[in-house]
């Protein structure tokens, strides 16, 4: 039986390594994979073992195994303070399956089309605030778009004081654990001390409480004015009944809504910011994209934009080269398991590494180059290309996020000519549990384009 390689290090060194991993996750992972191979153990003298995989065969084995073999929910406890105990991400077993069945349809198939016009209109409204010649912060703008989009999917078209408060407070909450330094709070529970609203964790708890109150107030208001014609996600969740006829409680609804709002906009905003970076960085990518957009017929609708092959490939390559989630959720083995000849004890934390899989030269030649063409030349399996994870935990917003990315980019590109405000190279930075372009990456609108994309007419 084979044993994966990895360092044996004392506790202090492990903590220092953990800090390095928080601040520079991609380079740390690359160094370890180079030194210890695949799979590797984070540290051999800790229990349980945390094992990283990047071999598609191993990843396939993990994604297609009986879900009952793994406990994913308890390994996600790091998200408990943010999302609450009823969050889909923290549920397991039958309850997890049931909630997924409920939440998947609104983000897929025909329902996607209904969001097309809204996504373009929100993008239009946000970019209309950019002034020619003035720099804007890319992350803030992309986050404004993606937050408004997910709020409208979750609550339906919505305005008013509570909605504005929710939008502002949610942004503050995510920013409070969004900087590389404050991300440390999520990884070290011992630092999660409430020393009043001026302390970082105290501030976090205060914002979280405000959001909880706003969500509960909205849920209660909606329960009072039930409208059978509404088809937004909150209406759907309020109407849902389990097999015993039981409706979801206010606390369950609150945690599920927050999960969708959180998972559904942070990630997409980071992906959009990266896409704009690459499109600016590589003029030939930009001109191919503009050329493709110009081929759209005047009556093309959002679905036609979403089908554009080069635009699709640019979005795929954006999520390949710097995936927003470094790894999938951890899978903790409930019983002994063998993967590719390695035997793992119950309790082992299995980490399918999205980043390391996307950095395999045997799958992605010239892997450090941003090459959308690779997605036009060949198809990758869902164990070779996995920006949205896989198996029973695969991202429920996969189709929604890709649809949104394409429409937002098409709208921006057909409206504005952009340029990065600085020529300095942009490096991936930690943002909470994810990795993103730096928050201060700025761009300038050099010119407004006159041409209207068909979808906006
Ligand atoms: C570019 C955007 C996005 C990326 C890169 C992304 C990535 C991921 C990844 C890697 C996972 C873990 C999958 C696993 O462990 O196998 C995940 C789970 C999840 N994502 Fe996304 N996501 C994105 C957008 C969205 C959107 C728009 C939504 C909401 C509609 C969403 C909702 C969720 C939820 C609820 C889960 C938990 C699923 C479960 O536990 O069963 N995500 N996402």
Image (tube, rainbow, N blue to C red):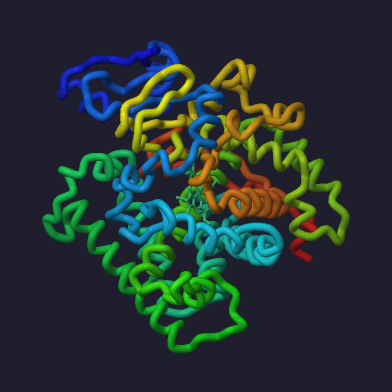
Q: Residue furthest bottom?
A: 225
Residue shown at 18% from the left, 57% from the top: 202
Q: Is residue 354 above or below residue 41?
A: below
Is there any visible trace of residue 96 in the rendered image? yes
Residue shown at 39% from the left, 12% from the top: 2
Q: Residue furthest left?
A: 195
Residue 56: give x, y in percent of width and height.
Answer: 56, 25
Residue shown at 76% from the left, 56% from the top: 303
Q: In this figure, what is the number of numbered marks?
A: 0
- The answer to whether 208 appears left or right of 28 in the picture is left
- The answer to whether 143 appears left or right of 112 in the picture is left
Q: Nearer the viewer, residue 151 or 438?
A: 151
Quadrant housing the N terminus: top left
- The answer to whether 377 appears left or right of 383 in the picture is right
Residue 23: give x, y in percent of width and height.
Answer: 33, 31
Is there any visible trace of residue 262 in the rendered image? no
Residue shown at 42% from the left, 79% from the top: 161
Residue 36: give x, y in percent of width and height.
Answer: 38, 12
Give the image quarter of residue 378.
Answer: top right
Quadrant housing the C terminus: bottom right
Residue 136: give x, y in percent of width and height.
Answer: 51, 50
Q: Nearer the viewer, residue 421 or 201?
A: 201
Q: Is residue 163 above or below residue 200?
A: below
Q: Is residue 276 above or below residue 256?
A: above
Q: Is residue 448 above or below residue 374?
A: below
- The answer to whether 392 appears left or right of 205 in the picture is right
């Amino acid at each position: 039986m084979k044993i994966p390689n990895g360092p044996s290090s004392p506790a202090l060194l492990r903590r220092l390594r953990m800090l390095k991993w928080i601040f520079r996750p991609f380079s740390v992972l690359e160094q370890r994979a180079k030194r210890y191979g695949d799979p590797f153990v984070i540290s051999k003298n800790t229990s349980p073992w945390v094992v990283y995989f990047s071999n598609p065969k191993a990843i396939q084995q993990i994604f297609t195994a009986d879900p009952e073999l793994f406990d994913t929910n308890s390994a996600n406890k790091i998200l408990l303070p943010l999302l609450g105990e009823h969050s889909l991400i923290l549920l397991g077993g039958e309850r997890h399956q049931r909630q997924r069945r409920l939440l998947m349809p609104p983000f897929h198939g025909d329902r996607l089309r209904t969001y097309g016009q809204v996504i373009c209109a929100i993008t239009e409204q946000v970019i209309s605030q950019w002034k020619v010649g003035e720099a804007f912060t890319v992350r803030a703008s992309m986050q404004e778009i993606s937050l408004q989009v997910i709020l409208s999917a979750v609550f339906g078209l919505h305005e008013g004081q509570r909605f504005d408060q929710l939008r502002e407070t949610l942004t503050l909450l995510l920013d409070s654990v969004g900087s590389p330094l404050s991300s440390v709070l999520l990884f070290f529970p011992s630092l999660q001390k409430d020393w009043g609203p001026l302390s970082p964790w105290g501030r976090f708890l205060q914002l979280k409480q405000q959001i909880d109150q706003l969500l509960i107030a909205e849920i209660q208001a909606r329960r009072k004015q039930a409208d059978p014609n509404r088809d937004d996600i909150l209406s759907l969740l309020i109407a849902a009944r389990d097999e015993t006829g039981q409706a979801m409680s206010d606390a369950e609804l609150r945690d599920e809504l927050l999960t969708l709002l959180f998972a559904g906009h942070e990630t997409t905003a980071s992906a959009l910011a990266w896409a704009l970076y690459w499109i600016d960085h590589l003029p030939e990518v930009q001109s191919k994209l503009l050329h493709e957009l110009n081929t759209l017929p005047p009556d093309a609708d959002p679905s036609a934009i979403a089908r554009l092959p080069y635009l699709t490939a640019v979005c795929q390559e954006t999520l390949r080269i710097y995936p927003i989630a470094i790894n999938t959720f951890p899978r903790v083995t409930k019983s002994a398991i063998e993967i590719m000849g390695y035997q793992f004890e119950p309790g082992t934390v299995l980490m399918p590494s999205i980043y390391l899989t996307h950095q395999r030269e045997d799958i992605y030649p010239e892997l450090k180059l941003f090459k959308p063409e690779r997605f036009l030349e060949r198809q990758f399996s869902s164990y070779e290309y996995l920006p949205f994870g896989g198996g029973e935990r695969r991202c429920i917003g996969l189709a929604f996020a890709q649809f949104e990315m394409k429409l937002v980019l098409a709208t921006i590109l057909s409206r504005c000519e952009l340029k990065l405000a600085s020529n300095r190279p942009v490096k991936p930075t930690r943002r909470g549990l994810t990795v993103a372009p730096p928050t201060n990456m700025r761009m300038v609108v050099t010119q407004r384009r006159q041409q209207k994309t068909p979808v906006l007419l």
